[in-house]
Amino acid sequence: MKITYAAVVLLFVACNTASNKEESKQPANTDTSMSVKQETVKFTITMVDNKKDPSCGMPVQGGIEDTIHYNNKVIGFCSKDCKDAFMKDAAKNVAAVEWKK
């Protein structure tokens, strides 16, 4: 029995077409248990090394919305705006930090 090149190509195409049809029959993954949940981190005063927000002076007990790590210390801020203001010149503004003892 002699198999020609054209017969091999037709067989290959037929096999690939059948395989693609089987894949398309499977339902799309609708499992929502794999979805990533974005959780809000709740900062506490025990997580930071400062007593007050160095930008506005608000005590960290009033609430911490954001933090940075600076010179091996964690500095808490009442808002992203205060953090951004601090970061404009962190080397200068670090002098205003009131550290916990």
Image: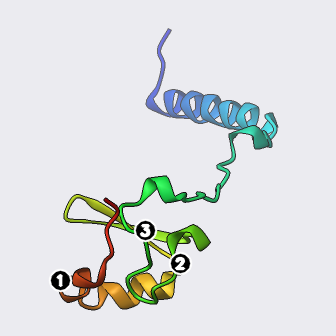
Task: Identify which residue, 11 or 42, lies in the foreground.
Answer: 42
* Left or right side of 20 for 63: left
Residue 91 marker: 1
Report if residue 6 is visible in the image: yes
Query: Element at badge 2?
Result: loop
Residue name at image x 45 percent, y 54 percent: 47
Amino acid at dot 1: Ala
Task: Identify which residue, 13 or 91, lies in the foreground.
Answer: 91
Amino acid at dot 3: Thr
Label 2: few (<14), some (14–19) or many (≥20) C-alpha neighbours in 10 Å: many
Label 2 and label 1: CA atoms lie apart by 19 Å
Q: Position of residue 78 (x, y in %)?
A: 53, 78
Task: Identify which residue, 80 or 45, lies in the foreground.
Answer: 45
Identify the residue position indicated by label 3 in the image: 67
Query: Element at badge 1?
Result: helix
Label 1: few (<14), some (14–19) or many (≥20) C-alpha neighbours in 10 Å: few
When the figure is inspected, residue 24 is found, relative to residue 68, above or below; the finding is above
When the figure is inspected, residue 89 is found, relative to residue 52, above or below; the finding is below
Residue 78 marker: 2
State yes or no: discs 1 and 3 in contact (Cβ < 8 Å).
no
Label 2 and label 3: CA atoms lie apart by 9 Å
Amino acid at dot 2: Cys
* Left or right side of 28 for 89: left
Residue name at image x 71 percent, y 35 percent: 23
Label 3: few (<14), some (14–19) or many (≥20) C-alpha neighbours in 10 Å: some
Residue name at image x 81 percent, y 36 percent: 25
- Answer with the quarter of the image where residue 38 lies: bottom right
